[in-house]
Image (spheres, rainbow, N blue to C red):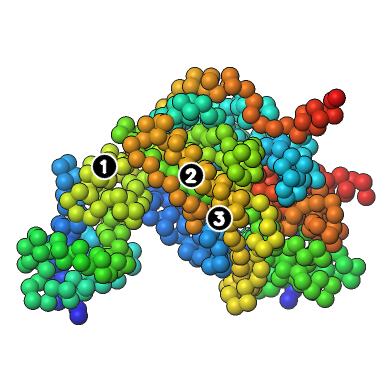
Amino acid sequence: MAGLPPVDILIVGAGATGAAVAWRLGQAGLDVLCLEQGEHMDPAHYPSTRPDWELARLQDFHVSPNVRRREADYPINDSDSPIAIANFNAVGGSTILFSGHFPRFHPSDFRVRSLDGVADDWPIDYQQLAPYFALNDRMMGVSGLGGDPAYPPIDGLLPPVPMGRLGACLGRGFNRLGWHWWPAYAAIATRPHHGRPPCINLGPCNTGCAQGAKASTDVSYWPAARQSGVRLQTGARVSRVTLDAQGKASGVLYFDATGNEWQQLARLVVLACNGVGTPRLLLNSACPAFPDGLANRSGLVGRNLMLHPLGYVEGLFDEALDSQLGPQGCSIYSHQFYETDSARGFLRGYTMQVLRGPGLLETATSGFLRREIPPGPGFAAALRERFGHLAAMGIIVEDLPDPDNRVTLDGELTDSHGIPAPKIHYTLGDNSRRMLAHGLERGKEVMRAAGARRTAAFGPVRHTGWHLMGTARMGNDPARAVVDARGRCHDVDNLYIVDSSVFVTSGGVNPASTMQAIALNIADGIVARRNAA
Amino acid sequence: MTNPPETGDRTLAVLLDDLLPPAVGVPTIDAPRLAEFAARHSRSAPLARLLDIVAAASPGTPFADLDAAARAALLSRIRRQHLAAFADFFLLAIQCYCLDPAVRQAFGDDPAAPFPNGRSLPDGDLELLEAVYERGPLFRDPHALTDKEQTP
Ligand SMILES: Cc1cc2nc3c(=O)[nH]c(=O)nc-3n(C[C@H](O)[C@H](O)[C@H](O)COP(=O)(O)OP(=O)(O)OC[C@H]3O[C@@H](n4cnc5c(N)ncnc54)[C@H](O)[C@@H]3O)c2cc1C
Ligand code: SF4
């Protein structure tokens, strides 16, 4: 195995958080190298450039690495979980597929124990993160509408994505019930932004945005990071973080694209492999000083996995909603049931995320599988009745941390380099079940208030484990947390974690905005520490 | 049991006619098109499997020679007894159908790739939000709550 000359800062993972941290550290003039197991994506080959784009979602752009099986993917044993893990492995990470729904955590999300008596408070708060939310919004190009009563003031947004007939129809439904709703916050440029063209409503944002309007980090952070001198090496799969004799991180071992193994030395190591990839790497880096996994004296590496169980609600309307048009995951949303009201029978809350309706193929497929579109003479008529007439809504449920929900290493399954695959152990807690049931009912109520002729609701939906949180939690007490408030491992002084593994609780919103704000905050902590040394 | 090719072709044509018939203003796909689609996507197996099941289920008279009522009864039995095989076949047929440009056009869908033309859609009426705005804030502010708690 060959050793490579040391770099100042080594980041593992070039996704949502790795890119943000790389840019911030590069801006500060530090010598930064990022290792990423995937490659650069070519937007000219994204599914939306092909008439059969809906098929790709079932194949090489599937959200599950176990189905997709691209070279950069590693298998994940999620057979012990009702929710399958979704991710993407490339420059840009899971933001290549993300829908760009970009709400922030609420201020109350950082004070869960104080306000609601469950889980734990975070060692940081909304006010501390506020400047980083704003900075991240600028870098990503976030659209939305100011004045939202669900949040403290949020400024500087690009105009919101069009809600379309679908959004307006459901907005009227929410109004009839007197419930909160607002245009979605979206990491989608609705005007030219930092060299990115505006959204043209292609639709399938979660198969990659060929237009470059969606802020996957390959088109948002990475161009700026590269300009500030950050080096990015693709096709580099890290197998272990190594330690020196003083117990400090000395670098990593990785396999390059041709299968050769290298040791990259570094003065400081940052992990940004996501809430499954990061604990996997730490557990696989067990050594005599850390027999249960690196930086795992607390025993919490891999534990407290939170996945946001997702409920799906559908309404069928007589009126043509053109619901298949527009950015797939972004239209309007509601936080009517976000803040705790114990009278509802559960603590904490959820987001109602209005989704665009399915394309023609998905309408037909799900209609057949759910026995709503029968084969035979009635097929075309039933399909016509549904296509463009369906409104859909995701219920994003805040799941509370539970140490038994966890990532471990699989005893048998490995990736193409022989590195053990992660194994997921996850069950829904009672609070999550009650919240999900509540959300499904309220979702149907909105659909009916908006005029739906028929409604359906179910959950948790299997292939929706895309929010991966809590597996290396943050906290001031080394016995109860893996990293401190600035992302530094309690057990290894120069090892940092910046992805949503560090989340103490999961909030009830899509996490990318909050995790990137946290990552930028951690990056500034690294810079400050450097400057002080 | 394996179908002789010509029987298989006839069976497939009649199967498609029964399961995905043309409707007013909506064309359908024919057997050669489905066979080609399946081969192109390396998924001929579900097709061959269902043809075998159909052949085995109508040993006396070829499926294509049965009358409509007998075919419907047989298909409904097959659907119950061979749920997975039927679903695999039909999902494949749906894919071929829904990706056919003429079919898509008939449903008002744009048969072209979404990129680069894009689609346009209305902004929606932002005045609908007035009522929401007027109800005022609905988030909890822990700092404000702490202040209030501290105020006698
Ligand atoms: C289909 C889908 C839709 C989503 N929609 C939304 C949404 O609308 N809003 C939202 O907020 N969030 C959404 N998410 C989630 C969001 O994309 C992720 O939470 C976010 O990207 C996670 O950022 P990250 O930096 O932690 O990890 P990732 O973005 O997953 O990046 C991790 C990177 O690390 C690399 N890596 C991992 N292990 C190694 C290793 N051993 N060696 C080298 N490289 C490694 C991976 O290849 C990957 O590129 C969605 C996700 C998916 C999959
Ligand atoms: S809808 Fe907009 S953001 Fe989504 S893929 Fe299309 S152009 Fe990109």
Q: Does the beta carbon at disc 2 come under 8 Å from ligand 1?
A: no
Q: CA distance from mark 2 to mark 1?
A: 26 Å
Q: What amino acid type should be assigned to the residue bearing mark 1?
A: Arg
Q: What amino acid type should be assigned to the residue bearing mark 3?
A: Gly
The residue singled out by tag 1 in the image is A384
Q: CA distance from mark 2 to mark 3?
A: 18 Å
Q: Is residue B114 left or right of residue A259?
A: left
Q: Quadrant of residue B16?
A: bottom left
The residue singled out by tag 3 in the image is A465
Q: Does the beta carbon at disc 3 come under 8 Å from ligand 1?
A: no
The residue singled out by tag 2 in the image is A440
One can see residue A472 in this view: yes
Q: Is residue B24 left or right of residue A521?
A: left
- Which comes before the other along the chain, label 2 or label 3? 2
Residue appearing at x 31%, y 42% in the figure: A386
Q: What amino acid type should be assigned to the residue bearing mark 2?
A: Leu
The percent position of residue B64, horizontal first and vertical second, equals: 10, 66
Give A277 or A39, whichever is nearer the viewer: A277
Give A41 or B45, whichever is nearer the viewer: B45
Q: Secondary structure at mark 3?
A: loop
Q: Do the numbered discs 1 and 3 sit on residues whose CB atoms are within 8 Å?
A: no
The percent position of residue B100, horizontal first and vertical second, equals: 26, 50
Q: Mark 2 belongs to which subunit? A: A
Residue appearing at x 30%, y 53% in the figure: A371
The percent position of residue A473, horizontal first and vertical second, equals: 74, 55
Residue appearing at x 65%, y 61% in the figure: A405
One can see residue B115 in this view: no
